[in-house]
Image (tube, rainbow, N blue to C red):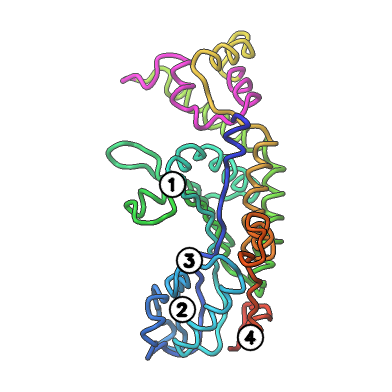
Amino acid sequence: MNKSNMNDYHLRGSIHTLTIKSNGIVTNVDDAVKRCITSITTTNNGLRTSSKLNLNNLTGDINTYPDFLTALDTVTAGAGIHQYDLVRVDMRFDSSDDDHYIKYAKLNRLLISMLACAYHVRNCYKTVDLFTEQQLSVAIKNDDFEVENYDKRAESGGTDTAKSRLEIRSKRMRGQDISYEFTVNWNRRWEKALQHFSTMQQRYNDGLERIYHQSINAYPKKFKNITDFLMQYQNCIFCKEQMIDLLQRLNTKNPETKFQNYKSRYGIDLFTITDARHAIGEIQRATRTFFEPSELIAKNNSLMPTKSDTMLSIEHPETSSSHNIHVTV
């Protein structure tokens, strides 16, 4: 991908939803916080309740972690939940640019595919519009986490300010502090994913080679020749080395020349591991901005240098302690 497009890859990070479990049945929820509890499920004959919360429904989008903790205390208190276990947290990375989803769908697929290879994820899929075959989402899911990139504008019917969304979802939190989970554990996952940049290419080429040989003599015809095949499956080809390797597997003469001719004549979006690192770096920056609001404050201060316009630090003494998986409010 060209440098200009990579430099325009910007995201805004925040927590989307979380799921908690508490003892007993959740009843008599204050009207002021009802809209923040999107689902309630009671199990074990009423002994345990699982509640899914979207704290952004309280007063609007929450852009800093201290404000998130304050809203969490407000909602749980309003629901009469004084002790709970944290089960799952979903973090979202949004863009409000109209063309962001289409423009970066392949790049995000690359990132998600590396994670899938690094952690041997089996549940990997994409969804498309029934009538247009337009891609709507790409996702991977296992017992510990999920990652999904989806067309938020299509999903919301254009009613949400976000047009594209990348979500990373942590399940079975196992006592992790929320901030530690997303600023440390997820950094480790992304670093491990980068180590599988080549593995990911090989996995795609294994699949593409199999498709080609199974379909080359099919009737009705699925593609006319190798060039046609490359066009149809270009979203599964992520870098120059992968494409040359695929051409070699398909017994193409002079694969490097074939690659250069194809690229100059038809064009194809390709990436390097540096591009992947850049995109992951942006995810990590957006994560830090949410969990370390001083970074956000410093950025705004640099844009608004006058004293009267300077954004002040928001302190919430009552929520300064970390929220682990077992919380007493």
Q: Quadrant of residue 248?
A: top right
The residue singled out by tag 2 in the image is 50
Q: Is residue 241 left or right of residue 83?
A: right
Q: Is residue 142 visible?
A: no
- Tell me the quadrant of the picture where the N terminus can be found: top right
Q: Nearer the viewer, mark 2 or mark 1?
A: 1
Q: Is residue 229 magenta?
A: yes
Question: Upstream in the sequence, badge 4 or badge 3?
Answer: 3
Residue 89: in magenta span: no
Picture coordinates of residue 90, whole percent (x, y): 53, 63
Can residue 48 be seen in this snapshot? yes
Q: Measure the C-alpha gap from mark 2 to mark 1.
A: 27 Å
Q: Which mark is residue 61?
A: 3
Q: Which residue is mark 4?
A: 318
Q: Is residue 318 depicted above or below 222 in this figure?
A: below
How many angstroms separate mark 2 from mark 4 (CA)? 25 Å
* C-alpha distance separating marks 3 and 1: 23 Å
- Element marked by disc 3: loop
> What secondary structure characterizes most of the magenta part?
helix
Which residue sits at x=71%, y=49%? 192
Marked residue nearer the N-terminal end (2 or 1): 2
Name the residue beneath numbered marker 1. Answer: 137
Of the numbered discs 4 and 1, the one sitting upstream in the chain is 1
**Which quarter of the picture shows residue 291?**
bottom right
Q: Which residues are magenta?
A: 219-248
Q: Nearer the viewer, residue 123 or 277?
A: 277
Between the C-alphas of marks 4 and 3, the distance is 21 Å
Note whether 178 is above or below 206 in the view shown.
below
Q: Nearer the viewer, mark 3 or mark 1?
A: 3
In the depicted structure, whether residue 79 falls above or below residue 90: below
129 up-or-down from 242: above or below: below
